[in-house]
Amino acid sequence: MATRASGGAKTTSSSSRTGSGGGAGKGGGARSGGGARSGSGAKSGGARSGAGKAPAPRKPRASSAKGRAPARRQPSQPDPVPQLVLGLFKLLFKLYHLAAVAVGSIFRAYGNGARDLDEEHRRDGLGLALLGAAIVLASVTWWTPEGVVTVALERVVRGALGVLAMTLPVVLTVLAWRTLRHPEHNEDTGRIVIGLTALGVGVLGIIHIASGSPTPAHDMAGVRGAGGVIGWLVAAPVKAALSGWVAVPLLILLSGFGLLVVTATPIARVPDRLAELWSLATLQGRPPRPEDETDDADGGKPKRRRKKKSEDDELEVGEHSRPYDTPVLDEETAKKGKKGDLADDIFGPDPLGVDSGADTGANSAADDFPPPPPPVEDDIPDTLIVSPGTPPDAPDVPDPSPAPSRTEQLPLSSSGEIYELPDPATLRPGSVAKPRTKANDAVVASLTEVLEQFNIDAQVTGFTRGPTITRYEIELGPAVKVEKITALTKNIAYAVKSSEVRIISPIPGKSAIGVEIPNVDKDIVSLGDVLRSPAATNEHHPMIVGLGKDVEGRTVVANLAKMPHILIAGATGAGKSTCINGLITSVMMRATPDEVRMILVDPKRVELTMYQGIPHLITPIITNPKKAAEALEWVVGEMDRRYDDLAASGFRHVDDFNKAVRAGKLTAPPGSERVYTPYPYMLVIVDELADLMMVAPRDVEDSVVRITQLARAAGIHLVLATQRPSVDVVTGLIKANVPSRLAFATSSLADSRVILDQPGAEKLVGQGDALFLPMGASKPMRLQNAYVSEKEIHAVVAHCKSQMEASYREDVAAAAGPKKEIDEEIGDDLDLLVQAIELVVTTQFGSTSMLQRKLRVGFAKAGRLMDLMESRDIVGPSEGSKARDVLVKPDELAGVLADVRGGA
């Protein structure tokens, strides 16, 4: 019974497990939700299965008890306290994540902005940061700290460095000064930091051992008073392992190595450096002075040192050209020119005392302090120019006389005036050159990307940044044609976002292709910087002029006497007038009126008016094209007169003739009252050649051709400038005799070919960007012309006018030659002449074709009438195709007609 009841309960229970939820009414155990049996179902099933069997209820009760245990774990509400704590932690995590993202974004933005800063600003920021750190450390190490932060910082610094903590602000100040004041030496900062670290570590270890080797665990105050924790970390292990007698020499070697690194001194050069320090300490490092050879018997007044003269005291005739010579000067050629073997070079000093073997002991001193050569013969004291840049202890100035602070000269004329050259500081400096900018890095990346896109085995190996453009160097891989790069001109221009891209293949002197791209941020090239450069100050020729700086940032200085003539051309606004101003200002800054005289032709009437009245002018500034042609004819006559004197005296160059005249070696023939005087250099500057060629093309071309063919040895040099470089202005004869060219930006390829005989000028960017082709060069050099402002020009002109008044030559204006012979016999043409005079004076228009139309006469008769009116000063001279100027006013007509009728 019990067994069956139990079994019935199990069966019912089993059926309730397998039932589908409808067994609730039959006692089946229904599953709720996921199949868990409910307590009511279990009870019901147990009761019904044991309905007629009394002894069986305990088992089902136990069974129902087993079924009730899982039923008690009903889904209950979560405890709010843990959920609140968990939510709080999640909220804190989200807030931390949000704050971290915000702070990271801010720092990344500042970091990108810092990377976008120029190198100069980043360098200045580093220097100021070092200076600020030095101030903070000085406040906590040199004085008693008061704040919590300063006290903690003082303990850290003194605990780390010990007694050397006092020197840390000084070291940081020196590093800050070096970073801010000498940016060109910043590449040595890493070496200096490494050396100072080694030196400081070694010294701290030695101080720690000398103080008794205190330990931080037992005597921290002693550690702070010794070498600090750093000294303890360095010295304690070595002393414990090798003893103090070995540790100290090792630390001394470490300190010595740091000192050698800081001073950049190899061990092999230590004796030399010690000798230099001893010489400096005992004032023995100055260059040896030459013996006083200039003391006169009448008081021993020191004079300029003279070169050693030959025994026979003969006048040496110089050579005025050297092999592979060029008008362009730089610092290296200037130094080489001072050591030349030629007898006399107009670019360098007279080396008569060099090849004789004398003064060999002073060669080293002469190399360091090259004596500035005078512009005239050393033996003649007529003109003594001392450069303002000559150091007080230069070998050329004997003791005890100091070098004059300004340029000094003997009297230039009978008036006894002393002429002083303008102060070089009158010309202001330009902007500081930037060796590298962010734009250069972007262009390098663009060029590299273009090469990769076209699968060309080439790479950008470097660049040289000039004032206006930057030249990027591309080196090709093996078996790569150069044409692959040159064919990518438009693609490169597209990539770098610039249309003015110029490719040079190859760069002169390098196995690389040059890609010239204009700079976004251009530098200003000042004429003052060019004239103060070593290339200009090392040369003392009066015809030295500053042109500008090339692509590599080197100063370009040229000698007009070596060119010997130059053609300057370019479109309007390209920088031609600024170049003319630079040439004239260079001459005024370096030459005196007795060395260089000038003739300025300015048909525009406004370009060169600021130079009116300077003492270098032979004649007032010429603005009339007809008078300009006459002035060129006078220059031709002056050239012939100079050549007559050279031929009669037996000299080939005007420099030799001037030396002989100053030395008194040249006298006039017997019976002649002429007194020989030195010939100055003559510089003729024509600002607009096209206007002259329009008025009198044949006369101007003949004069220019004769001057350019013959005038070099006579000391006459021509500068022709035009903004219309066409073949009718710059003719073939003019081009053949003007070997030096300076081309600014042109509007077409044809104009570039007229100036340079090759393309290139049409791709210039303007504003002083030019191509300079000196005499003898095959390829032009690209340069940025030097800029001089009108304010600087006015200051230089005012100084020159204050030194001497202008002295003009009257024969220049009267050099037009004999006036055209005109038949003054009017004859039967009186009536026609009277009608022509009335017509011309009343209309104020003197035209031959008008006379033909109005008077119904032929061209010959109209020309004769015009010549008759010119002979009576009624109309001016002919100006080509232009109408003649009418010199008589309408209210003067009656008197003129009466004179004509009375004279007839």
Image: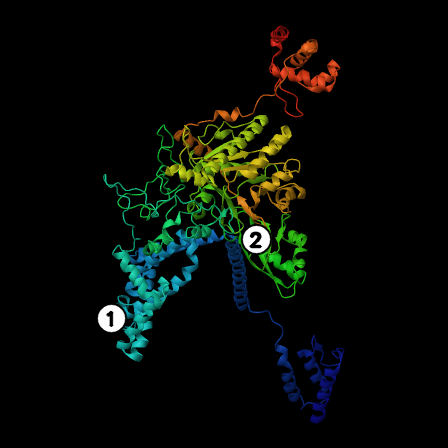
Kind of element beneath mark 2: strand
- In the image, taking residue 820 as reference, residue 432 lies left or right, namely left
How is the structure coloured here? rainbow
Residue occupying the point 64% across, 88% down: 58
Q: Residues within 10 Å of mark 1 (few under 14, many from 20)?
A: few
What residue did someone put label 1 on? Answer: 210
How many marks the image carries: the answer is 2
Q: Residue 100: where, in percent of width, then height?
A: 52, 60
Q: Does residue 562 appear anywhere in the picture?
A: yes
Q: What is the distance, in whole Å, between disc 1 and disc 2 at their CAs?
A: 60 Å
Q: Residue 802: where, in percent of width, then height?
A: 40, 29
Q: Residue furthest front?
A: 670
Q: Residue 12: where, in percent of width, then height?
A: 73, 85
Image quadrant occupied by the N terminus: bottom right
| Residue 383 vs residue 157, the one in the foreground | 383
Q: Earlier in the sequence, mark 1 or mark 2?
A: 1
| Residue 529 vs residue 236, the one in the foreground | 529
* In the image, residue 822 above or below residue 234: above
Tag 1 near tag 2, CB within 8 Å? no
The amino acid sitting under disc 2 is Arg
| Residue 520 vs residue 44, the one in the foreground | 520
Image quadrant occupied by the C terminus: top right
Point out which mark residue 471 bears.
Answer: 2
Kind of element beneath mark 1: helix
